[in-house]
């Protein structure tokens, strides 16, 4: 089957296979975006956890230096 789409005066002809390929590309792109966001979220968690650990270690070192 052939699908005909009209966009701002232009005509696009798409076969069912072409429509399925476009949908698969969109799904793949969405999955890649979701995974990239997960990676950014994990990196941010790691960053804040590392920063907190550095602060705790600094406090413990200062406490030892002060003699507490």
Image (tube, rainbow, N blue to C red):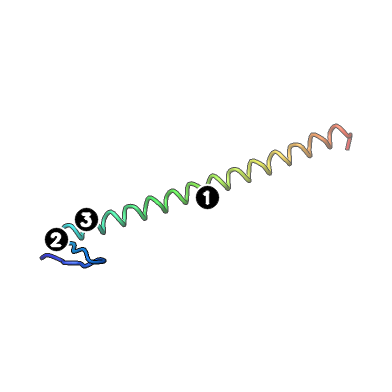
Choose mark 1 or mark 2, whichever is in front: 2
- Tag 3 residue: 21
Residue under the point 26% across and 59% down: 23
Q: Is residue 42 left or right of residue 8?
A: right
- Tag 1 residue: 41
Mark 2: give few (<14), some (14-19) or many (20+) Cα within 10 Å: few
Q: Which mark is residue 26?
A: none
Mark 3: give few (<14), some (14-19) or many (20+) Cα within 10 Å: few
Q: Position of residue 52 (x, y in %)?
A: 68, 44
Q: Position of residue 60 (x, y in %)?
A: 78, 37
- CA gap between label 1 and label 2 equals 39 Å
- CA gap between label 3 and label 1 equals 30 Å
Badge 1 vs badge 2, beta-carbon distance below 8 Å: no
- Mark 1 element type: helix
Residue under the point 24% across and 57% down: 22
Choose mark 3 or mark 1, whichever is in front: 3
Q: Dividing the image into 4 quarters, which one contains the C terminus?
A: top right
Q: Residue furthest front?
A: 9
- Mark 2 element type: strand
In the displayed structure, 36 sits above or below 16; it is above
Q: Quadrant of residue 65?
A: top right
- Mark 3 element type: helix
Q: Quadrant of residue 51?
A: top right
- Tag 2 residue: 15
- CA gap between label 2 and label 3 equals 10 Å
């Amino acid at each position: 089957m052939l699908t005909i789409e009209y966009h701002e005066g232009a005509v696009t002809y798409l076969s069912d296979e072409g429509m399925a390929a476009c949908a698969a590309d969109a799904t793949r792109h969405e999955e890649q975006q979701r995974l990239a966001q997960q990676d950014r979220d994990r990196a941010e968690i790691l960053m804040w956890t590392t920063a907190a650990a550095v602060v705790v270690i600094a406090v413990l070192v200062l406490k030892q230096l002060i003699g507490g």
